[in-house]
Image: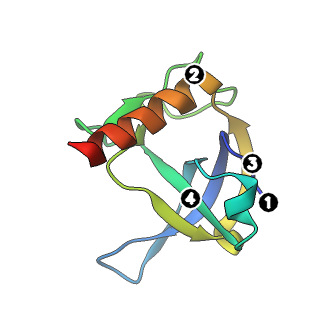
Amino acid sequence: MPKRKEIILARVFFSDSPESKVRPAIVLSDDTYHSTGFILVSAITTASDGYCAPISEKDANCQLDKNSGARFDGIIKLHEKQAIRSIGRVSAGFHNGLVEKIVGTIAK
């Protein structure tokens, strides 16, 4: 089971389509939550808008596409079987900042 702050490749299904796509995502949830068989993640995308936190080279210990960002306007719940493999980690500072942005978006 992936750990909090890990960057994973996961099979993500779209809300408006039965299609799925393998994409990178940052694990937000902890081991207690993972004991349910599910993982909470933030999708990583290159389609940046005002609701993406840019990921710099110093924020992650793996190679991501240029201009990648973590979405903070939608947390995705995945079954553990949708997690394919870990490809790296984000820094504690980036993870904490991402969580703050998620909370700030919800609290507005």
Question: Mark 4 or mark 1, which is nearer the start of the sequence?
Answer: 1
Q: Position of residue 21 (x, y in %)?
A: 49, 66
- Counting the numbered discs, the total is 4
**Residue neighbourhood size for the residue with mark 4, other residues' Cα within 10 Å, grouped as few (<14), some (14–19), many (≥20):** many
Residue 64 shown left or right of residue 80 in the figure: left
Residue placed at 68% from the left, 45% from the top?
4
Question: What residue did someone put label 3 on?
Answer: 3
Q: Are marks 2 and 1 in contact (CB under 8 Å)?
A: no
**Residue 18 in the image: above or below residue 34:** below
Q: Are marks 3 and 4 in contact (CB under 8 Å)?
A: no
Q: Are marks 3 and 1 in contact (CB under 8 Å)?
A: yes
Q: Position of residue 38 (x, y in %)?
A: 64, 69
Kindly report the distance in space between the C-alpha atoms of the residues bearing marks 2 and 1. Answer: 22 Å
Kindly report the distance in space between the C-alpha atoms of the residues bearing marks 3 and 2. Answer: 16 Å
**Residue neighbourhood size for the residue with mark 3, other residues' Cα within 10 Å, grouped as few (<14), some (14–19), many (≥20):** some
Q: What amino acid type should be assigned to the residue bearing mark 3? A: Lys
Question: What residue did someone put label 1 on?
Answer: 1
Residue placed at 38% from the left, 71% from the top?
14
Depth check, front residue: 49 or 34: 34
